[in-house]
Image: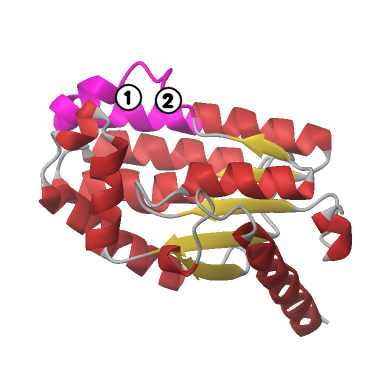
């Protein structure tokens, strides 16, 4: 049975998966897209030419990294617009500006001039007609210990060399960011409430929650 039809999820919906590094965004994106028959939009990590350099020298490469991500994210937004929706998106463009670029500016690893340039580019992009705002943002949350454990299990060398203090600060910033986020409705899902990898049927429980939440938020808008 098509779970999108069973739970009355709009065929043109755009659902964004948000959360800190290692929380399981890509796994959730794939599982929901498969169950709903949606396309996927993934963050380009493996082909990013700045990522390894960034982790070795934040100050030197933070601006380059964020500009790369911003450009790639905007291309994905344009693709979603051209297809008319029906996408599950791995990480939102809002996280780039609201967490990562802001953090490097506040910590002094991105200059005020670079940060202002970045913000101006972001503002110009979100004002274009190619920028569909998501219908729903799913925020994957968990304790710092759970998330660091997943990062270690994933085993990416550049992440293994990163101090725990960095992940702790990122975790705190995400919590603050999502509490203030207002661009679209937010559904919080704790990573300990399901196990998509070991129990594929758990995705249906998540879709049931999505359907109920979307119906409630639509009623509130009326």
For the point 42% across and 42% down, which residue is it? 119
- Please tell me whether residue 46 belongs to the stretch shown in magenta: yes
> What number is the disc on residue 64?
1
The extreme front residue here reads 198
Give neighbour class at mark 1: few <14, some 14-19, many 20+ (Cα, 10 Å).
Answer: some
Residue 118, image x and y in percent? 39, 36
Give the quadrant of the C terminus: bottom right
* In the foreground, 194 or 141: 194
Count how many numbered circles sit on residues in the image: 2
> What number is the disc on residue 68?
2
Describe the element under mark 1 as helix, strand or loop. Answer: helix
* In the foreground, 77 or 203: 203
Placement of 124 over or under 189, stated as above or below = above
Residue 101, image x and y in percent? 32, 43
- Magenta-colored segment: predominant secondary structure: helix
State the CA–CA distance, disc 2 to disc 1.
Answer: 6 Å
Left or right: 133 with respect to 5? left
Residue 48 figure quarter? top left
For the point 15% across and 31% down, which residue is it? 59
Left or right: 112 with respect to 199? left
> What number is the disc on residue 137?
none
* In the foreground, 110 or 165: 165
Residue 32, image x and y in percent? 66, 50
| Callouts 2 and 1 close, C-beta under 8 Å | yes
- Please tell me whether residue 74 belongs to the stretch shown in magenta: no
Residue 213, image x and y in percent? 69, 75
Describe the element under mark 2 as helix, strand or loop. Answer: helix
Q: Which residues are magenta?
A: 44-70
For the point 65% across and 61% down, which residue is it? 136
Placement of 89 over or under 23, stated as above or below = above
């Amino acid at each position: 049975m098509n779970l999108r039809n069973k739970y009355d999820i709009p065929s043109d919906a755009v659902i964004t998966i948000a959360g800190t590094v290692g929380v399981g965004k890509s796994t959730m994106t794939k599982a929901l897209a498969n169950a709903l028959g949606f396309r996927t939009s993934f963050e380009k990590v493996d082909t990013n030419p700045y990522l390894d350099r960034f982790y070795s020298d934040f100050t030197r490469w933070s601006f380059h990294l964020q500009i790369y991500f911003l450009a790639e994210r905007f291309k994905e937004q344009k693709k979603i617009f051209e297809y008319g929706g029906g996408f599950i998106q791995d990480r939102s463009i809002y996280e780039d500006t609201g967490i990562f670029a802001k953090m490097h500016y506040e910590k002094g690893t991105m200059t005020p001039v670079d940060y202002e340039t970045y913000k101006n580019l972001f503002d110009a992009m979100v004002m274009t007609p190619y920028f569909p705002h998501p219908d729903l943002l799913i925020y994957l949350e968990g304790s710092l210990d759970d998330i660091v454990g997943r990062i270690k299990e994933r085993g990416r060398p550049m992440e293994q060399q990163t101090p725990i203090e960095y992940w702790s600060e990122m975790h705190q910033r995400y919590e603050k960011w999502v509490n203030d986020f207002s661009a679209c409705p937010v559904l919080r899902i704790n990573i300990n409430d399901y196990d998509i990898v070991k129990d594929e049927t758990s995705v249906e429980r998540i879709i049931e929650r999505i359907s109920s939440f979307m119906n409630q938020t639509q009623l509130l808008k009326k």
